[in-house]
Image: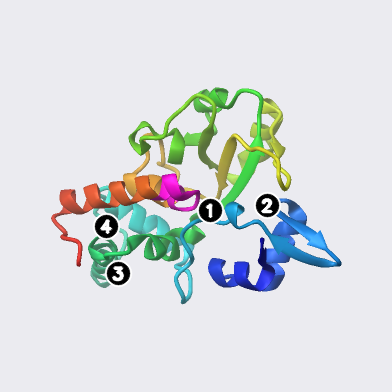
Amino acid sequence: MISVEEAARHLGRSERWVRAMLADGRLDGERIAGCWLVDPASLPVVPVRAGRTAGVEMAWSLIALSDGDRLDGLSAVARHRLRRRFDELLASPDPLPLLRALLDSRAERHRLHVDEPEALLVEDAFIASGRSDPRSGMYGPDFAEGYVRPEDLRAVRRRHLAVEAKAGERHNLVVHVGNVPEGLRAPVPLLLVAADLAQAGSREAQQAEIILRDLGRYWGVERDG
């Protein structure tokens, strides 16, 4: 177990935020003599990079760019800056902290439990990504991951009897809740799959690395080092 201070430093968040996540069951931990201790296994393996997290609009624009979108609605300067960030990401010898810093604001991550996770994959309001994308190399019928818009979350949870996974409880559903672009459908851009995997455990992080390396080859960007 580690202290709240250590967990906050790893996550790039405040200690107050970590305590709130512990109390809500979104991080695993134990309260001893009035002080929280955090189970490091419940933390994402990749730490948040120092500095401010990119904005929501920028994050989704970068995801669209990675999938070949021309981004005609942006100025030439904005497109140039996005492409430079994308190239820096693909060229980085340690890309996962940068990936999280760039895309962390895209949505909120919720861990839940359902009786039939595979049923989410035919849910109209659920956009499969992360481990539920076959290209992740981690697809399986006993786990579901994807995106849901805020206005659809309650109905999706009700239809599938999804409950929040409390501290120490097993979860088999990860829902990313956010204002995703209207045109987002499965299969989602590979950069989004990599970002989802990078928020999970060490095996998922390895798969995220593979996806980023393949994207670098596709875009002709060589990794430094």
Closer to us: 100 or 177: 100
Q: What quarter of the picture does the N terminus occupy?
A: bottom right
**Circle 4: residue type:** Asp
Who comes first in sequence, dot 1 or dot 2?
2
Q: Tell me what residue is drawn at x 46 percent, y 60 percent.
A: 46
Q: Residue furthest right?
A: 33
* Residue where numbered disc 3 is placed: 78
Q: Position of residue 68 (x, y in %)?
A: 24, 49
* Residue where numbered disc 2 is placed: 26
CB under 8 Å between discs 1 and 3: no
Q: Nearer the viewer, mark 1 or mark 3?
A: 1
- In the image, which residues are magenta? 196-205
**What is the magenta segment's predominant secondary structure?**
helix
Spatial distance from mark 3 to mark 4, Cα to Cα?
Answer: 10 Å
Closer to us: 52 or 139: 139
Q: Position of residue 176 (x, y in %)?
A: 55, 46
**Circle 2: residue type:** Arg
Q: Is residue 115 above or below residue 42?
A: above
CB under 8 Å between discs 2 and 4: no
**Circle 3: residue type:** Ala
